[in-house]
Amino acid sequence: MRQIMVVKREMLFAEKSFDGFLPANSFDFESVILSNFEWMNKDKAESNPGYKQPVGYSIIYNPILKQIFLYQRSKIDQNYAEKRLQGKWSCGVGGHIEKVDTKNGNPIHESSLREIQEEIKIFGKRRMQVLGYINDDSDDVGKVHFGILYLVVIDNGKVEPLDPEISEGKLVPLSVLENKCNAPDVAVENWSKIALSPLKKI
């Protein structure tokens, strides 16, 4: 069975709790996660709100063009198994933290790098920084996940999808994401809606 990193909810929020977005300089949730994580079968974790699954959520950003990578998750069952997110628009690249990510340094960071390499191709150089954290208990996905929001700054205007889980994606102005978030007939995942506000301040 596939095992992923989890943290007991009561441990994660023992000193600080929040809803929505919290800047990285407000509290060091990374250290809390790295000091208190456990491993759990993914199927069990997905239905256990007593635990949170830390997930690196990386926004690909070109500061020269002032554009982010925006993509749509595949609607095809065989390409995207997670029905709760199927077909939704997203600006965050990421996934669960696995044991393979513990080999070199910070597993949250290593997981984020691995997910980026698996899902997209970035042309040129990049650098990563933690913008903050996302917590959203308003739906079944958010209740069992906790986001570490990364900003991945790139110096090239080309990013291409690699994974069939992505049906389409490209660099676009932030206003495109904002318009989709405000459109009643467009499905955008909650974390991307939450990330919009801190992104507008960059």
Image (cartoon, helix red, strand yellow):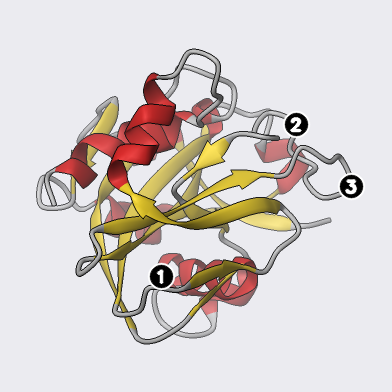
Residue at screen point 29% across, 39% down: 175
For the N terminus, the image quarter is bottom right
Q: Nearer the viewer, residue 79 or 124?
A: 124
Specify whether 53 is left or right of 4: left
Mark 1 or mark 2, which is nearer to you? 2
When the figure is inspected, residue 167 is found, relative to residue 86, above or below; the finding is: below
Query: Can you give x and y, in whole percent of width and height, for residue 31 in the image?
Result: 28, 59
Local crowd at mark 2 within 10 Å, few (<14), some, or many (≥20)? few
Among numbered discs 2 and 3, the one appearing first in the sequence = 3
Q: Nearer the viewer, residue 58 or 166?
A: 166
Among numbered discs 3 and 1, the one appearing first in the sequence = 3
Could you say whether the residue bearing mark 3 is in a helix, strand or loop? loop
Residue at screen point 70% across, 35% down: 86
Specify whether 167 is left or right of 189: right
Query: Can you give x and y, in whole percent of width and height, for residue 202 in the image?
Result: 13, 52
Residue at screen point 89% across, 47% down: 78
Give the labeled residue for mark 2.
83
- Looking at the image, the residue that sits furthest to the right is 78
Residue 165, disc: none
Quadrant in the picture for residue 99: bottom right
Q: Please say if the residues under marks 3 and 1 sit with CB atoms less than 8 Å apart.
A: no
Residue at screen point 50% across, 38% down: 145
Does residue 10 appear in the picture of this structure? no
Give the labeled residue for mark 3.
78
Could you say whether the residue bearing mark 2 is in a helix, strand or loop? loop
Specify whether 168 is left or right of 196: right
Give the labeled residue for mark 1.
109
Q: What's the distance in space between the residues labelled 3 and 1, CA to CA?
A: 28 Å
